Image (spheres, rainbow, N blue to C red):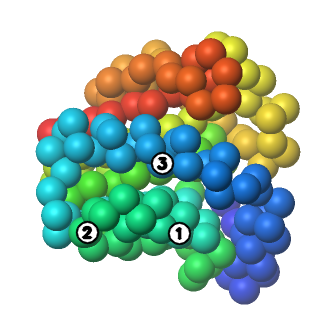
């Protein structure tokens, strides 16, 4: 949780973003999320909330692929949002969270609420703790999320390769 003034929290989030890798490295994740959205029934005009949107690169990727959808970015660097305290809105078709949940103190609670409020589904990616030391990977990581954690809250997880074999968990939920 942010224990500082919202303006300071926003500044800290912006500073974190400047240290992230190149867009082309992140596209691998976006491609997998887009693939899942389509398998799950994504349609033009759908409303997609992107939790941990950062610089809105997921939208950039989707639009570059010709997707037409309504995009709602949620990120501390945009508006000071602290996802550990965020209230999940109603009315979203989709929630996506790409390499964000491991940064939270209580990600399972948030993911359960996303599942309860989504119209069409949720797609989450996170480092796979079976093959990656999640806490050592990034000093801002707080909570490794396992396959069993996802299953326990009703998500369908699968290990996928982004950088090396099974380094990432991609988990989906549909009502």
Give the SS element for disc 1.
Answer: loop
Question: Residue at (80%, 35%) from the top-left corner?
Answer: 137
Against 27, is 72 above or below? below
From the image, tell me which residue sits under label 3.
30
Question: Residue at (67%, 21%) from the top-left corner?
Answer: 164
Mark 1 vs 2, N-terminal side: 1
Q: Position of residue 51 (x, y in %)?
A: 48, 59
Q: Position of residue 145 (x, y in %)?
A: 57, 29
Q: Quadrant of residue 68?
A: bottom left
From the image, tell me which residue sits under label 2.
69
Relative to 142, is 75 on the left or the right? left
Q: Position of residue 127 (x, y in %)?
A: 63, 31
The crowd level at tag 1 (other Cα within 10 Å; few <14, some 14-19, many 20+) is some
Per the model, the C-alpha gap separating discs 1 and 2 is: 14 Å
- Number of the label disc, if any, that sits on residue 88: none
Mark 3 vs 2, N-terminal side: 3
Question: Residue at (50%, 19%) from the top-left corner?
Answer: 159
**In this orientation, does residue 107 appear?**
no
From the image, tell me which residue sits under label 1.
56
Q: Quadrant of the N terminus?
A: bottom right
The crowd level at tag 2 (other Cα within 10 Å; few <14, some 14-19, many 20+) is some
**In this orientation, does residue 157 appear?**
yes
Q: Are marks 3 and 2 in contact (CB under 8 Å)?
A: no
Per the model, the C-alpha gap separating discs 3 and 2 is: 15 Å
Against 173, is 1 above or below? below
Per the model, the C-alpha gap separating discs 3 and 1 is: 11 Å
């Amino acid at each position: 949780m942010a224990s500082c003034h919202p303006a300071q929290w926003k500044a800290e989030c912006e500073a974190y973003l400047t240290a992230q890798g190149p867009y082309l490295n992140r596209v691998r994740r976006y491609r997998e999320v887009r693939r899942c959205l389509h398998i799950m029934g994504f349609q033009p005009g759908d409303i997609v909330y992107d939790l941990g949107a950062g610089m809105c690169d997921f939208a950039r990727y989707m639009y570059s692929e010709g997707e037409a959808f309504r995009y709602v970015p949620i990120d501390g660097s945009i508006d000071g949002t602290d996802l550990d305290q965020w209230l999940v809105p109603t009315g979203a078709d989709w929630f996506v969270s790409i390499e964000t949940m491991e940064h939270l103190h209580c990600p399972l609670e948030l993911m359960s609420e996303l599942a309860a409020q989504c119209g069409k589904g949720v797609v989450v990616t996170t480092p796979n703790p079976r093959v990656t030391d999640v806490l050592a990977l990034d000093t801002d990581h707080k909570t490794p999320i396992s396959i069993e954690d996802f299953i326990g809250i009703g998500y369908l997880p699968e290990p996928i390769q982004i950088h090396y074999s099974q380094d990432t968990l991609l988990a989906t939920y549909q009502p």
